[in-house]
């Protein structure tokens, strides 16, 4: 039984906690919360609550939420800590993990140097086996890694041009905008290109534009392969991966609104869509050139990757066995509705 | 075992189907779908699919979705049909239900005349007992009925002025706007005032403004009671009802974004919030005047009401027993986090 | 010729600068900018640019934008400074103005105590005559003052309940949200009620809800008058004020999108709508109770008020003459299309 | 004096009417309106109003708006009709124009076959000279034509991959969504690619995604040139065209919100931005590959093209003279703030 501590219980942390709890070989020993808010109240009926340090105790006490200990206690009780604190905080936490000799999984908001390796289950599980720490790449990079790994391993990828239309903020945030504008990232290529190369060695350029939506990111990808293929080859490469879900416009999946609705219909925890979603009827192939459109549920696509990263660090399961275990626990691919 | 047919499997129909299936005394005998879309695909693994008439069969056949029969078959197999077809279609369906002698529950998009009675579980369950048909009032009216029934039955309501800030469309729709505007309904009072009076005899005026959001409606209510009260009286009147959930701004529930996030944390099916949500820290009382702000999850607040309406029509359970059974099956009030 | 300095050239400052420049009895001696951005570039072809102090000079120099001096220079050259710096900064600037003996007009983001008097041209022009400083109340309060002054002076207002649906941010901002939520202000009454009473002695309660739109605020007002009136009385009270524009739903003005479009059609500078907009077909009267819906263009409704405030402080023109001069320079009421 | 009739006075028609009126060699003889709405009211003080046929007269009469005649009258009085009716209506109008022997300018919502030639002033003015009709390509295609013509004529374009992030609807519409979703066009390449080739012979693929914003479209372009270039070459190719405006992120132009704000600062009629806007600091060049991000003001970028199309059809001015005249009348390039 791998004992997992969750440090940071926001968008990512709470989902990883839930997924870990569903694994037969893992259990959540506690979660770290900084504020005694409604999320803490609900979580306290399911998980032991820890706080970063003693200075946080009073607020939780005032709010009537029971605290089990502080972060250093949690670290002592854990085999692996999943650090899902805000961007940059993970780096500050590394000394504590190192000193305590606990393994650590970081998230994509941290720079690559935070951990021994960057991680994606499909493209580089093995490189993390037995390491002390791994960084699960960001939601966008995870999405890129999934479909491009499928293409790269089957046909070879020569070059990729990607346009990333980013959701501006998560659904549970009400402070960030824009409300009615499109905001380009003026750095070209955007950081997604180098980030992808930490987990998959493909030549890629990316441009990112922020749009006023909270649901999902959309990627438009123009890929030049190393050899000529047919549309059916590409579709079958995608459909052979459980963490890719093919959808069809003619079945009423016209926008990210319906993709998220599909997740609700599938009965997913928190209405999440762990799979990368690709529109089957928009896969276009001409010689060595492939174009397609994919949607990334930023809140949840990294969740199965975190679970696999824990097993890789612990060296407790092989790549394929881990992916199978994770996917079956989360019902990923269990309800493949197309292809 | 009450056999329930669901005619119309959209926003409301699919949720009522799920809730009915969770009751010990009911089961869904089938659902009517008009299009073989992703919703139908997912539903077909759980429910028998029917279509309005033979002309729909080919499309489902082409899509590879198995159809069990047509609406008239479903009606024959049902004790009660829940009609959750689009506004106005319910009225067109009444002759079929009447001829077949099946009981029917309609939704708030229909005019009051569509059914023998209009329905809200708190305010007028008994008036529907044994009737042939009932109309569950709309999401907004249901929300108004819940909090105003609490006030009216405890203190007497003399007059209400309500401003209803409406979500413009549901989350799974991508066609309707506005994207960046506020749209007043120029009819004053809006239709919500007379609609409320079909289930609760209070003097009310309402004005409605449409806002570019999909999550929830918000109501601002200024109520003049028949007697003077304290803030604590009002809060305890609200908190005594399981279908009202009190939330606090200081616990981080600052907007409808967090209310919906709370529903996800609570693990609700489709991330729904069946309860009317009232901000406890914004209840203001001065003499006989009470002001408060409530949020209505339009997709789901009518769901428990539909379940109760079925039992009322069938005369199979008393009001309180039905409400208890419904609430416990949906975990309503089971996780009361405030108050 | 009244010499006017504009300190702060954001949403409000730039519009006041333009309006001042259009007056026969005033001229802009300079504007204070803090950043050498696109706004400064365009402004520099029309106005002399000043900066708060010497520390800002290098940035403007690097950007190639010519600076005429610092704030203290501008103050020396001015009879009146219009302070349109961000909320709270105005207060910090008061000692400079006082020491220099220059008159000052502040904006509604400052607390009432910042100035000798709070200001609205219709309701309290005279109280500002000859004073050292005045605070033009906020966009929302200015809107409330306009229609309620019309009702109060003609019929007497006994009580007002107002619901204010606030635009979340201005169109030229891309950082603030929410993108898809409604956010109530949990303080009831909201600050608008006491703010209105600084310029108009009426009994009012207000509740404010923030909505994801940038165009305009909408107010829903329920007013109890001191005497019974007819709908036509109320409409004629409104239509007798040039700074109120009546619009009709049946003429296609269905939402704030069309109100802003109307401003564009009218050829207004920056497509502004200086007038408070009231839907004529939604004015409802019953005995002493009046309900109506008004829309406030937050970026510009305070602009004519600033111009009048300057004249009031200078004591250079009577109330009605000033309002006439301001309105005719900005074409307010010149294109009255209804009523 | 070229006599111009404007058939259809919506987003495009009203702007073309204004621009035509500003030309020394043209005048608007009348505009065709179908509804007596607020737009008609304002327009009637500036232009003679016509209606499609007699059946429309009563509604205008009831609304008190004076009508000068019907479309056939307007055609008789015109040398050229600019048809800015909704998509598809232009085609239906062609027989009337042909029979009357009047020249006609159509808009991009019509198919290419509607007119003798498709039109863009930079890329194919001469092909329209003396023809009977021309179709000004759509807002997106006009934007593509401008920057790609600059690149193609200076360096030769081998291939273009474009991602078009479309504004979902215009600011004066409140009906269309999505409110909170991204909607891909599942046809790849989208119609923009073939449409561009009607005015510029370059090899291009495009993918289009609709986003919930009303302000502007954004295009991400990856271009392979026929020869190697430097970044400065590309920037100077762009900056040599008046109808391209370069902006800089470091000057505060971070999103389409600021681009539109800049248009307001420039004092443009209806706050329009006729120029194609390109972010100078996001132009990336590597060998023969160029990437850049451009923003298109859909409401107005085709306006100068319509004016030039009129002159081309009339054969009354050479290409460069026409472009100069149009640009100077609309102050295009007169306030070049960068480059
Ligand atoms: N949200 C996404 O779309 C997304 C997707 C993939 C990866 N990520 C990455 O995951 C990480 C977490 O992001 P998130 O979106 O979950 O953020 P979040 O803001 O939703 O959650 C972070 C949580 O950490 C808590 N916290 C703050 N300081 C802390 C501290 N010192 N110790 C412990 N907890 C602390 C916050 O209260 C919050 O609950 C970041 O690296 C981010 O880049 C986010
Ligand atoms: N969505 C809400 O916010 C909400 C809330 C409360 C009440 N209501 C009411 O519930 C009713 C249903 O609304 P909804 O939001 O679920 O609509 P919806 O559009 O989401 O669902 C209606 C479903 O009925 C199907 N349908 C269409 N014609 C049909 C026919 N002839 N026979 C059977 N099915 C048909 C549609 O395909 C769709 O799946 C309406 O009366 C509405 O006013 C809606
Ligand atoms: N925007 C509105 O809707 C609105 C409406 C009515 C009143 N107001 C009030 O008007 C005032 C100004 O608001 P705004 O919306 O124009 O803000 P803004 O942010 O658009 O503009 C403020 C400007 O002041 C500049 N600035 C910052 N610090 C400065 C300093 N120390 N000295 C000089 N300039 C400085 C900023 O760079 C900015 O350009 C506030 O009191 C606000 O509450 C705003
Ligand atoms: N809005 C844009 O972003 C944009 C940009 C470039 C090109 N276009 C193209 O310009 C054309 C007009 O589009 P728009 O956006 O101005 O549309 P719009 O809907 O804003 O305006 C069309 C106008 O035509 C009127 N109309 C309808 N039927 C008519 C008839 N039979 N005779 C005369 N008038 C009639 C309508 O009342 C409306 O005022 C379309 O081909 C469109 O594709 C639009």
Image: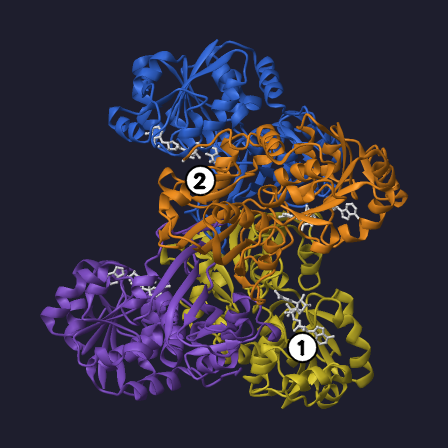
Chain colours: A orange, B blue, C yellow, D purple
Between A310 and A174, the one lying in front of the other is A310
Instruction: Give the number of the mark in front: 1 or 2.
Output: 2
Please tell me whether residue A1 is drawn above or below residue A305 in the rendered image: above
Residue C80: x percent and y percent?
70, 83
The answer to whether residue D229 of the structure is visible from this angle is yes
Between D4 and D44, the one lying in front of the other is D4
User: The residue tagged with tag 2: helix, strand or loop?
Assistant: strand
Q: Identify the residue at horizontal 63%, vertical 75% (top origin).
A: C13
Asked if labels 1 and 2 share a chain, the reply is: no
Dot 2 corresponds to which residue?
Answer: A246
Residue C121: x percent and y percent?
62, 71
Question: Which of the numbered marks, if any, corresponds to residue B162?
Answer: none
The residue marked by circle 1 belongs to what chain?
C
The answer to whether residue C315 of the structure is visible from this angle is no
Between D263 and B113, the one lying in front of the other is D263
Between B41 and B97, the one lying in front of the other is B41
Please tell me whether residue A64 is drawn above or below residue C125 in the rendered image: above
Please tell me whether residue C330 is drawn above or below residue D174 in the rendered image: below
Evaluate if marks 1 and 2 touch, with contact meaning CB atoms under 8 Å apart.
no
Residue projecting furthest to the left: D99
Q: Residues within 10 Å of mark 2 (few under 14, many from 20)?
A: many
The residue marked by circle 2 belongs to what chain?
A
Q: Is mark 1 within 8 Å of ligand 3?
A: yes
Dot 1 corresponds to which residue?
Answer: C35
Q: Quadrant of the C terminus of chain C?
A: bottom left
Q: Identify the residue at horizontal 43%, vertical 68% (top origin).
A: D223
């Amino acid at each position: 039984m791998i004992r997992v501590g969750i440090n940071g219980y926001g968008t990512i942390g709470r989902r990883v906690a839930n997924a870990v709890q569903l694994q037969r070989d893992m259990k959540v020993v506690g979660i770290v919360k900084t504020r005694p808010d409604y999320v803490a109240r609900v979580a306290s009926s399911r998980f032991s609550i820890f706080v970063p340090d003693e200075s946080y105790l009073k607020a939780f006490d005032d709010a009537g939420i029971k605290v089990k200990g502080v972060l250093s206690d949690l670290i002592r009780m854990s085999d692996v800590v999943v650090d899902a604190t805000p961007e940059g905080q993970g780096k500050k936490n590394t000394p504590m993990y190192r000193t305590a000799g606990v393994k650590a999984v970081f998230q994509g908001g941290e720079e690559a140097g935070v951990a021994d390796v960057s991680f994606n289950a499909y493209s580089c599980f093995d490189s993390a086996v037995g390491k002390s720490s791994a960084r699960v790449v960001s939601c966008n990079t995870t999405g890129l890694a999934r479909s491009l790994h499928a293409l790269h391993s089957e046909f070879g990828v020569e070059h990729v041009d990607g346009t990333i239309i980013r959701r501006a903020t998560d659904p549970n945030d009400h402070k960030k905008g824009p409300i009615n504008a499109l905001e380009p990232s003026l750095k070209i290529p955007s950081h997604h290109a180098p980030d992808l190369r930490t987990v998959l060695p493909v030549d890629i350029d990316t441009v990112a534009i922020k749009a006023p939506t909270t649901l999902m990111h959309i990627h438009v990808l123009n890929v030049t392969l190393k050899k000529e293929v047919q549309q059916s080859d590409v579709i079958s490469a995608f459909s052979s991966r459980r963490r890719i879900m093919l959808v069809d416009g003619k079945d009423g999946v016209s926008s990210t609104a319906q993709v998220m609705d599909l997740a609700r219909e599938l009965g997913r925890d928190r209405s999440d869509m762990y799979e990368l979603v690709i529109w089957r009827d928009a896969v276009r192939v001409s010689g060595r050139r492939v174009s397609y459109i994919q949607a990334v549920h930023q809140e949840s696509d990294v969740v199965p990757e975190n679970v696999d990263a824990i097993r890789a660090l612990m060296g407790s399961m092989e790549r394929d066995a881990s992916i199978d275990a994770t996917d079956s626990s989360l019902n990923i691919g269990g309800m493949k509705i197309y292809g």
